[in-house]
Amino acid sequence: MVQRIRVSILGEVRVFLDAVSSRLAREDGMEIGAVAGSIRELLAAARTRPVELLLVHLGEETPQPAEVVWDLKTLFPHTRIIVAGCKRNELEIVKLVEGGASAYLEHDTSYQVLLQTIRDVFEARTSCSLGVLGHVARRMTELAAARQDADQCGLKRLSSREVEVARLMALGLSNRLIAKRLKIRPPTAKNHVHSVLHKLMVKRRWEIGRTTLMRRRRETGWRPNGPMEEA
């Protein structure tokens, strides 16, 4: 029996959600999972049905699309993500791939291309242009060089408290929520956040996830709580 592809859709534009979900529902081998207007709605739907493949519609006004993708990948680590709708340059698309997107589609993509991309991603084939692949390769080289430089400089280790803070940052918590979870004052949490960013040599909070978890896993065998668990 041919395995059916269950597609969930996330986006703020209701006409996009309705149009795409209704048309995909008529395709052989396709079924619609959650259709959500927010991450909160998607999380609620995921409690009863896993999100296997997610089509995310991001508008031009979305300020940090890579952070949105990273947050989604943190919450749904086994979900394959297709980003559609936001017109970005190739370097920004690379950031989407780094954040966890399996494919990127511009706003003028045809329905047939969307359909084929869904099938490709379901079968674990990443979909992007040769130009983007070139940027990805160069970015991988840059990251490898930066990692080597950091090791040569003797990157400072995080304290046990900073590990806790970094884990919560990787889960997308704000300074205020970090302070609440760890039962510390907000200014103290803010200081720990700045220290973590400095020690791990990153500028953005969403970069903490891979840097922190991979390093601590390699050095100590430490494992984070699951993304849906309470810290």
Image (cartoon, helix red, strand yellow):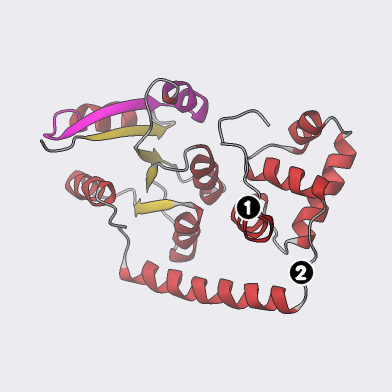
Residue 155, label in figure = 2
- Asked if residue 33 lies in the magenta stretch, the reply is yes
Q: Nearer the viewer, residue 67 or 75?
A: 75
Instruction: Give the residue at x 38% y 29%.
Output: 50
Residue 128: quadrant of the picture: bottom left
- Asked if residue 168 lies in the magenta stretch, the reply is no
Q: Residues within 10 Å of mark 2 (few under 14, many from 20)?
A: few
| Residue 205 position in % (x across, y down) | 67, 50
Instruction: Give the residue at x 82% y 54%.
Output: 195
Residue 18: quadrant of the picture: top left
User: In this rendering, would 46 be left or right of 128?
Assistant: right
| Span colored in magenta | 24-45
Q: Nearer the viewer, residue 200 or 134?
A: 200
| Residue 120 position in % (x across, y down) | 23, 52
Residue farthest front in this picture:
221
Q: Nearer the viewer, residue 83 or 209?
A: 209
Residue on which disc 1 sits:
213
